[in-house]
Image: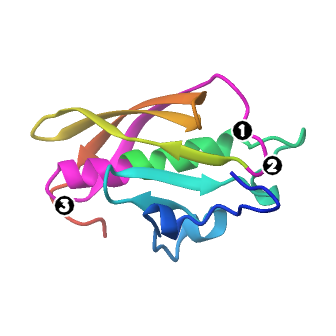
Amino acid sequence: MTTETNVFDPSAAGWTLVQDEGFIAHVGPLHIRGTDGAYAFRAEQKHANLIGVVHGGMLMSFADRALGETAMRAADGANCVTIQLEMKFIDVGRLGDWVEIRPQVVKRTGSLVFMRGDVREGTRLLASADGVWKILRRRPG
């Protein structure tokens, strides 16, 4: 949260930048907190839709990245790809919001990781995500 006298500093609160030169570099920056595996981003103008709130596609991209990276850790570092992602949009994200998700591994099998997570701004629930990630046996070509 930001006020005139108190500017939120993610690094002081234990957040580090997610390093990515691909798609996330365009829509980020995203942050991760190592203590609990939570991910976050500050909603900026570039994340807005036509009515001036956070675009659902940004919330989906954010959830996909956070759940996907967590799935790869659950798969002992193997590459994973999203095979299904469902989002339920519950409330709007506003510009300036610090939006967080705490990914949860529901189950890991030999070839799949089932994930879920709630996208929140503080205690306010913005969206709920559920998905399945395929564990790859080899790197994509």
Q: Residue furthest left?
A: 110
Pointer 2 or 3: first along the chain: 2
Report which residue position mark 2 lands on: 48
Which quadrant of the figure contains the C terminus? bottom left
Report which residue position mark 1 lands on: 93
Identify the disc placed on residue 77.
3
- As for residue 88 lying within the magenta part, the answer is yes
Residue type at numbered disc 3 = Gly
Considering depth in this image, is 60 or 40 the residue closer to the camera?
40
Pointer 1 or 2: first along the chain: 2
Q: At x 50% / y 69%, what residue is drawn?
A: 11
Rounded to the nearest angstrom, the CA distance separating label 3 from label 1 is: 32 Å
Pointer 3 or 1: first along the chain: 3
Residue type at numbered disc 1 = Gly
Q: How many marks?
A: 3
Residue contact at pointers 1 and 2, CB within 8 angstroms: no
Considering depth in this image, is 121 or 18 the residue closer to the camera?
121
Tell me the element at label 2.
Answer: loop
Q: Quarter of the image holding residue 45?
A: bottom right
- The vertical placement of 78 against 131, above or below, is below
Q: Residue furthest bottom?
A: 21
Name the mark nearer the viewer: 3 or 1.
1
Residue type at numbered disc 2 = Ala
**Residue 28, position in %: x, y?**
61, 64
- The vertical placement of 78 against 111, above or below, is below
